Amino acid sequence: CIKKAIALEGRASELATALSRRSDQICCNCKTQKTSLWRRSQNGEFICNPCGLYYKLHNRDRPQEMRKDSIQTRNRNKPKNANRKKASNNSPPETVPISPPGPSFTILPPGSLMYNQGTPF
């Protein structure tokens, strides 16, 4: 693949902005121009998301026969059981009475048997 040279002077934010504007990018493996995400191969070349994921899983380039002209999307519907769980969970949760906070120790008046008069226990 021929790497597209980008002449940038300045900071990393300018580089990130330029990389996000890649409308004429071509995958070095399958030659597609449309992808949901551009990745880089181990050689630093740009590859499309399906080719990058295939390489990550199989440790070899994605075959040309697997190339599709359209981007496939997933149908992310809610599970059928989700409504049933909500319907059965309409009853309010059980409440547990909470006792008022009290002292965690007993205060003894001076002169009682347990009163510390400067001597350790």
Image (tube, rainbow, N blue to C red):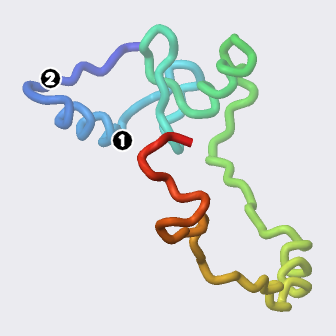
Say what secondary structure mark 1 lies in: loop
Name the residue located 78 percent from the left edge and 83 percent from the top edge: 96
**Residue position for label 1:** 23
Q: Residue at x 85, y 74 (%)?
A: 82
Measuring 24% from the left and 19% from the top, which residue is drawn there?
Answer: 5
Give amino acid for label 1. Ser
Residue 21: in sight, yes or no?
A: yes
Screen quadrant of the N terminus: top left
Count of numbered tags: 2
Image quadrant where one finds the C terminus? top right
Percent of width and height locating residue 102:
59, 76
Percent position of residue 61, x then y: 66, 15
Q: Above or below — where is 101 with respect to 29?
A: below
Q: Which residue is mark 2?
A: 7
Image position, residue 74 (x, y; %): 72, 55
The label nearer to you, 1 versus 2, is 2
Label 2 packing within 10 angstroms: few (<14), some (14-19), many (20+) = few
The quarter holding residue 93 reads bottom right
